[in-house]
Image (cartoon, rainbow, N blue to C red):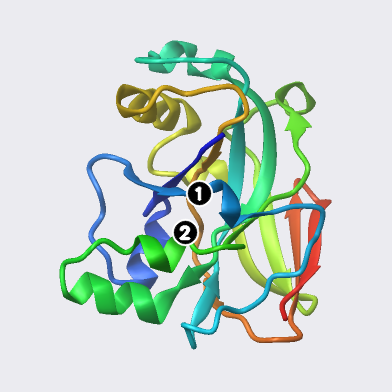
């Protein structure tokens, strides 16, 4: 099982980080050791002093696919969940300034909490999903998949050109604006169409 993640997929988030709008999906990966399940606590890493939350819709792949056409991409998504792409922003900024890969800022252990997954048949339109994140009951991030630069279908099609998609693979699809640092004691709750998907503590 692999985790594929898409960066810079919401225009307002691109603006808040002063990044350039991409013409193709920005793709990076996380190892399986990044996953946290069942509301396990997130432990702040000792190598960063500025870890940011980034709430995202996560797609689960239901069957093997390679060179998937956009028109058929929906057939490869069997479930949808919610996750957090934790980012060591200070480390990422340092590496970006040097023109170096920033994998360690995104892919460290525990950096990808994920919720349980709901079958795609539970949703009338995957291109119109509301989701949000609260920190200590305060709304921090709110988005809708109709705000994405690249749709789920475009993401699945693009990614499958480079990586064979296999059953159980996860795709993080990008975060809306509102990312911010977390601290020990924070409680993060994620909602998908008003359904509570995760509820965990930062330690």
Residue wearing tag 2: 107
- What numbered label is drawn on residue 31? 1
Residue 17, percent from left and from top: 35, 71
Residue 106 quadrant: bottom left
Who is closer to the viewer here, 83 or 196? 83
The crowding category of the residue bearing disc 2, from other C-alpha atoms within 10 Å (few below 14, some 14 to 19, many at least 20), is many
The image shows residue 43 at horizontal and vertical percentages of 67, 75
Q: Decide which of tag 1 and tag 2 comes sooner along the chain.
A: 1
The numbered disc on residue 202 is none
Picture coordinates of residue 147 (x, y %)?
48, 46
Q: Quadrant of the N terminus?
A: top right
| Mark 1: secondary structure | loop
User: Is residue 160 left or right of 145 when viewed as pictured?
Assistant: left
Q: Are marks 1 and 2 in contact (CB under 8 Å)?
A: yes
Asked if residue 39 is positioned above or below residue 155 in the image, the reply reads: below
Q: How far is the residue under mark 1 from the one under mark 2?
A: 6 Å
| SS at mark 2 in the image | loop
The x, y position of residue 53, in whole percent, is 57, 69
């Amino acid at each position: 099982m692999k985790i594929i993640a898409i960066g810079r997929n919401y225009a307002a988030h691109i603006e808040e980080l002063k990044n350039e709008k991409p013409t193709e999906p920005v793709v990076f990966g996380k190892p399986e050791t990044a996953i946290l399940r069942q509301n396990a606590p997130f432990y702040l890493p000792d190598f960063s002093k500025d870890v940011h939350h980034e709430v995202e819709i996560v797609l689960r792949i239901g069957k093997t696919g390679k060179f998937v056409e956009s028109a058929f991409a929906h057939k490869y998504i069997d479930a949808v969940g919610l996750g957090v792409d934790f980012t060591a922003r200070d480390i990422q900024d340092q590496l970006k300034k040097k023109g170096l890969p920033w994998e360690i800022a995104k892919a460290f252990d525990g950096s990808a909490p994920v919720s349980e997954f709901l079958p795609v048949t539970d949703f009338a339109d995957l291109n119109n999903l509301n989701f949000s994140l609260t920190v200590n009951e305060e709304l921090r991030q709110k988005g809708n998949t109709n705000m994405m630069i690249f749709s789920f279908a475009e993401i699945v099609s693009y990614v499958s050109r480079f990586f064979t998609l296999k059953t159980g693979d996860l795709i993080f699809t990008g975060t809306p604006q509102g990312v911010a640092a977390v601290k020990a004691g924070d409680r993060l709750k994620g909602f998908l169409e008003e359904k509570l998907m995760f509820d965990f503590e930062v330690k």
